[in-house]
Image (cartoon, grey):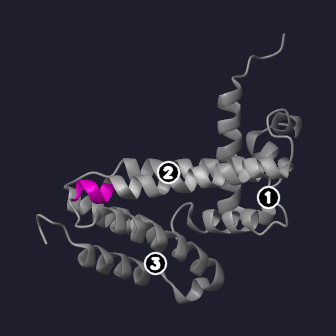
């Protein structure tokens, strides 16, 4: 009798395996076979839920974005500390999913044609990132919260591209200093 498998759970396992492979081997190592091996099965274990490499890239990106969003929603401490931590996350593309997210996004966006549904998924993930920044700056009572959220978002996206272009010139400590400086510039209405 076949084993019952929850499709959502299996897709989550595939996405998480994709993330691990991206971190360990880069985008070139992210294949259906590599994911199947990471899950301890044959490629049909993957292809029953993800039809092709394009869908595997998309699922991996969604998983990375979800992990990053989880980090943002779990910030603790006073609002001004959460703002500093959010700014640090905005530029912390060296840690965990950082370079993987940047490389994956650029790989997807560099394709000759992008399926409109795929582009919608990317925009949804990026809109969620902007929304999280908006929540943090409003909680910190930052003057001009719309502009502050936009700045964090643009700094985050710019950092992604910069790291792909020239990783060696932007070590984590340099990016962290820039993020700290940005939060001081943003200040808060009640504290700054």
Q: Position of residue 70 (x, y in %)?
A: 45, 47
In this view, 55 is above or below 182 = above
* Residue occupying image coordinates x 46% and y 58%: 130
**Disc 1 crowd, CA 10 A, few/some/many (<14, 14-19, 20+):** few
In this rendered view, identify the residue nearer to me: 40 or 161. Answer: 161
The residue at which mark 1 appears reads as 114
**Distance Cα–Cα, label 2 vs label 3:** 24 Å
- Which one is closest to the eye, mark 1 or mark 3? 1
**Distance Cα–Cα, label 1 vs label 3:** 32 Å
- In the image, residue 138 lies in the stretch drawn in magenta: yes
Q: Is residue 2 left or right of residue 8?
A: right
Q: Are marks 2 and 3 in contact (CB under 8 Å)?
A: no
* Residue occupying image coordinates x 36% and y 47%: 74
The residue at which mark 3 appears reads as 172
Quarter holding the C terminus is bottom left
**Distance Cα–Cα, label 1 vs label 2:** 20 Å
**The residue stretch that appears in magenta:** 136-140
Q: Is residue 89 left or right of residue 181?
A: right
């Amino acid at each position: 009798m076949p084993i019952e498998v929850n499709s959502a759970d299996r897709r989550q396992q595939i996405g998480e395996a994709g993330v691990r492979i991206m971190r360990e081997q880069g985008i070139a190592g992210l294949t259906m076979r590599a994911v199947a091996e990471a899950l301890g099965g044959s490629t049909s274990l993957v292809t029953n839920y993800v039809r092709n490499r394009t869908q595997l890239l998309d699922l991996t990106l969604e998983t990375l974005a979800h992990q990053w969003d989880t980090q943002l929603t779990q910030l603790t401490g006073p609002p001004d500390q959460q703002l500093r931590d959010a700014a640090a996350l905005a530029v912390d593309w060296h840690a965990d999913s950082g370079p993987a997210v940047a490389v994956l996004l650029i790989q997807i966006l560099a394709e000759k044609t992008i399926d409109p549904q795929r582009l919608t998924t990317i925009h949804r993930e990026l809109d969620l990132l902007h929304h999280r920044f908006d929540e943090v700056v409003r909680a910190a009572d930052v003057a001009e919260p719309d502009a502050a959220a936009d700045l964090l978002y643009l700094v985050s996206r710019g950092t992604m591209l910069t790291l792909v272009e020239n990783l060696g010139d932007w070590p984590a400590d340099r990016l962290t200093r820039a993020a700290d400086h940005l939060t001081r510039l943003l200040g808060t209405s009640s504290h700054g």
